[in-house]
Image (spheres, grey):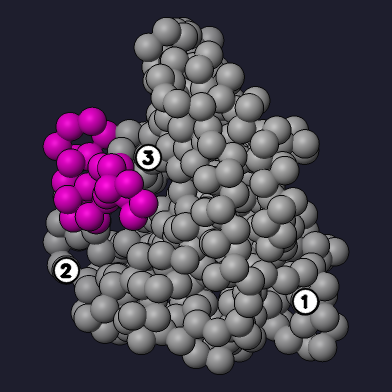
C-alpha cells in the first residue's frame, strides 16, 4: 500500500481496535487530522515512550507538533470534557493553540440532561423491557451520546457549539428545552429538582467563552485546506460494526462510524480519502450488550483479556473477548472500502497452542452462510464455523520486521490476508510506536 494524499483510518470490528496508535503513526504523513463522528464515548490510547495518552474527543494527531487537528460537525461535543482534555494535554507539555485545534461551530453539544436521560433510559430498558434476547438496554457508556444525536434529529431541541458564544440566545433556548427535558426525565423515573435553564446557560456560556478561540466553521476550513493541497487524515471513532445504519442494530452507536460518515461529518464532498486503512485486532472484542458469535466466556476469553489489557479506555469496563471473526471483518472492509489492513495486538496471541478463525456461520435453520448478519436478532442465533491454525509460543514484542515473526504467526497473517483479499501492511506487536511492523513502501 502506498498512502495517497488523503487517508481514512476506520475500525472494522466493535471498536477498541487500536485506531489511535495508527492515527498517531500516520499523522507524520499528513497535514490535518479530522475526527468526523462520535463523542466522548470513544477512547483512543497512544503510547509514546513511557507516556500513555488516553484521548476521547480531540483527534490523536494533536500529539504531533505543527499538525492541525479538527473536530468536525459530525461529532457531538461535551464542552466540559473537551476543556478537561485540553488542560490535561497542556499540563503534559502538548501545545494546543487556536491554530492547532479547530472545533466545528455546527457540532452538537452534549448537555447534562443528555447524560441523565441516557442513564435513566438504560435503567428502564434493563429492568422492565424484556425481549427474546433478554433486556433491551444497549450497554451505553452513559455519556449522553445517543440523546444528543436524537436532539440533532429533533432539531428544535438541539444546541450547537456556535450557540455557546451567544449567552442571551443560549438562555432563551434553554428556557424551552429544560421545561421539556424535565418532564421527560420525570417520566423516566428521575427524581430531581426541575432543570435550571439560567444556571445551565451561565455554565455553558463560560465553557463557550473558553472554547471561543477554537470554535469555527470547519466545513469551509477543511475545504480550503483540501483546495490548498494539504493532506488530510480522517480519524474514525467507534467502528463499522457499531455504525448506526450498518452495525449490529440496535446494539450500535448513534453515528455513522464507518468511513461512510466522513462526507456528512466533515462537509467534504466525496471522494474524501484516496486510501482507507481498516483496523482490526488479531482476535475480537466487544464492550456492552449485543450478539458476539465468537465470544469465549471461559479461560480463553479471560486469557485474551488479561494479555491484551482489554478494559475500556473510557469506562474501564472489561471487554468481552473471543476468536477472530473474519466474516464480520470482511463485511466491514466492504462497507468501509478498505484498501489495506492494520492488524493490531498480534502479540496477545503468543502462547496459544492453536488459534481459531471464524469463516462462516451456521444458522438455526441449518443453513450456512459466509455473509455477516447486521441485525442483532438474526446474529444472535448464528454459530461460528471455525478454521483452526497452529499457534506459537514465542513472545514477539521485540520484533522489528515482519520476517522476525515465528512461522506460525506469519501463516496466521497470511491466512487473514487470503480470506480478506486485502494486504496487511501494518502489524502491531505492542503498544508503543516502535512496536509496529510496516510493509516496505507502505507509507510512500
Which residue lies at the image location 77% right of the left edge and 82% below the top edge? 225
Q: Is residue 129 visible?
A: yes
What span is colored magenta in the figure? 296-319
Tag 1 and tag 2, C-beta contact below 8 Å: no
Question: Horizontal and vertical percent for residue 164?
Answer: 66, 58
Residue at the bottom extreme of this rendering: 66
- The residue where tag 1 is placed is 221
Q: Which of the marked residues, 3 or 2, is nearer the chain's N terminus?
A: 3
- Say which element carries label 1: helix
SS assignment at label 3: loop
Residue in the foreground of this view, choosing between 33 and 358: 33
Q: Residue at x 43, y 21 (%)?
A: 190
Describe residue 2's horizontal placement relative to residue 105 as left or right.
left
- The residue to which callout 2 is attached is 395
Q: CA distance from mark 1 to mark 3?
A: 35 Å
Q: Is residue 372 visible?
A: no
Q: Nearer the viewer, residue 198 or 305?
A: 198
Q: Which of disc 2 and disc 1 is earlier in sequence?
A: 1
Near mark 1 (Cα within 10 A), the count class, few <14, some 14-19 or many ≥20, is: some
Q: Which residue is mark 3?
A: 287
| Rendering quarter of residue 85 | bottom left
**In the figure, 422 relative to 354: above or below?**
below
Q: Position of residue 440 (x, y in %)?
A: 50, 86
Q: Is 145 on the left-hand or right-hand side of 411?
A: right
Structural distance between the alpha carbons of marks 3 and 2: 27 Å
Amino acid at each position: 500500500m502506498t498512502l495517497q494524499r488523503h487517508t481514512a483510518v476506520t475500525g472494522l470490528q466493535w471498536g477498541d481496535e487500536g485506531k489511535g496508535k495508527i492515527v498517531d503513526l500516520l499523522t507524520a504523513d499528513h497535514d490535518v487530522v479530522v475526527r468526523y463522528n462520535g463523542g466522548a464515548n470513544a477512547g483512543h490510547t497512544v503510547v509514546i515512550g513511557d507516556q500513555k495518552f488516553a484521548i476521547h474527543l480531540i483527534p490523536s494527531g494533536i500529539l504531533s507538533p505543527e499538525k492541525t487537528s479538527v473536530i468536525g460537525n459530525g461529532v457531538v461535543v461535551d464542552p466540559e470534557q473537551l476543556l478537561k482534555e485540553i488542560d490535561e494535554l497542556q499540563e503534559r507539555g502538548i501545545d494546543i493553540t487556536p491554530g492547532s485545534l479547530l472545533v466545528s461551530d455546527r457540532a452538537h453539544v452534549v448537555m447534562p440532561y443528555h447524560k441523565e436521560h441516557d442513564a435513566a433510559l438504560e435503567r428502564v430498558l434493563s429492568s422492565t423491557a424484556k425481549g427474546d434476547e433478554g433486556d433491551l438496554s444497549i450497554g451505553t457508556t452513559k455519556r449522553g451520546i445517543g440523546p444528543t444525536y436524537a436532539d440533532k434529529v429533533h432539531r428544535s431541541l438541539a444546541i450547537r457549539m456556535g450557540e455557546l458564544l451567544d449567552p442571551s440566545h443560549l438562555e432563551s433556548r434553554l428556557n424551552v428545552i429544560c421545561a421539556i427535558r424535565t418532564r421527560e426525565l420525570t417520566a423516566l423515573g428521575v427524581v430531581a429538582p426541575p432543570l435550571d435553564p439560567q444556571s445551565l446557560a451561565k455554565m455553558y456560556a463560560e465553557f463557550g467563552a473558553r472554547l471561543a478561540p477554537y470554535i469555527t466553521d470547519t466545513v469551509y476550513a477543511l475545504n480550503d485546506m483540501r483546495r490548498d493541497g494539504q493532506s488530510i487524515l480522517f480519524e474514525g471513532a467507534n467502528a463499522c460494526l457499531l455504525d448506526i445504519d450498518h452495525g449490529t442494530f440496535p446494539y450500535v452507536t448513534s453515528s455513522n462510524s464507518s468511513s461512510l460518515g466522513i462526507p456528512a461529518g466533515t462537509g467534504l464532498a466525496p471522494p474524501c480519502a484516496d486510501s482507507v486503512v481498516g483496523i482490526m485486532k488479531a482476535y475480537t472484542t466487544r464492550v456492552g450488550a449485543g450478539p458476539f458469535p465468537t465470544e469465549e466466556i471461559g479461560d480463553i476469553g479471560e486469557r485474551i483479556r488479561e494479555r491484551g489489557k482489554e478494559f475500556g479506555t473510557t469506562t474501564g469496563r472489561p471487554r468481552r473477548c473471543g476468536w477472530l471473526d473474519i466474516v464480520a471483518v470482511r463485511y466491514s472492509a466492504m462497507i468501509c472500502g478498505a484498501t489495506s489492513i492494520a492488524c493490531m495486538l498480534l502479540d496477545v496471541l503468543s502462547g496459544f497452542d492453536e488459534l481459531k478463525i471464524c469463516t462462516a456461520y451456521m444458522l438455526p435453520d441449518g443453513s450456512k452462510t459466509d455473509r455477516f448478519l447486521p441485525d442483532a436478532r438474526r446474529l444472535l442465533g448464528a454459530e461460528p464455523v471455525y478454521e483452526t491454525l497452529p499457534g506459537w509460543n514465542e513472545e514477539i514484542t521485540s520484533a522489528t520486521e515482519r520476517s522476525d515473526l515465528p512461522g506460525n504467526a506469519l501463516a496466521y497473517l497470511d491466512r487473514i490476508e487470503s480470506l480478506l483479499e486485502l494486504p496487511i501492511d501494518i502489524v502491531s506487536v505492542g503498544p508503543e510506536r516502535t512496536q509496529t511492523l510496516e510493509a516496505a513502501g507502505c507509507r510512500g
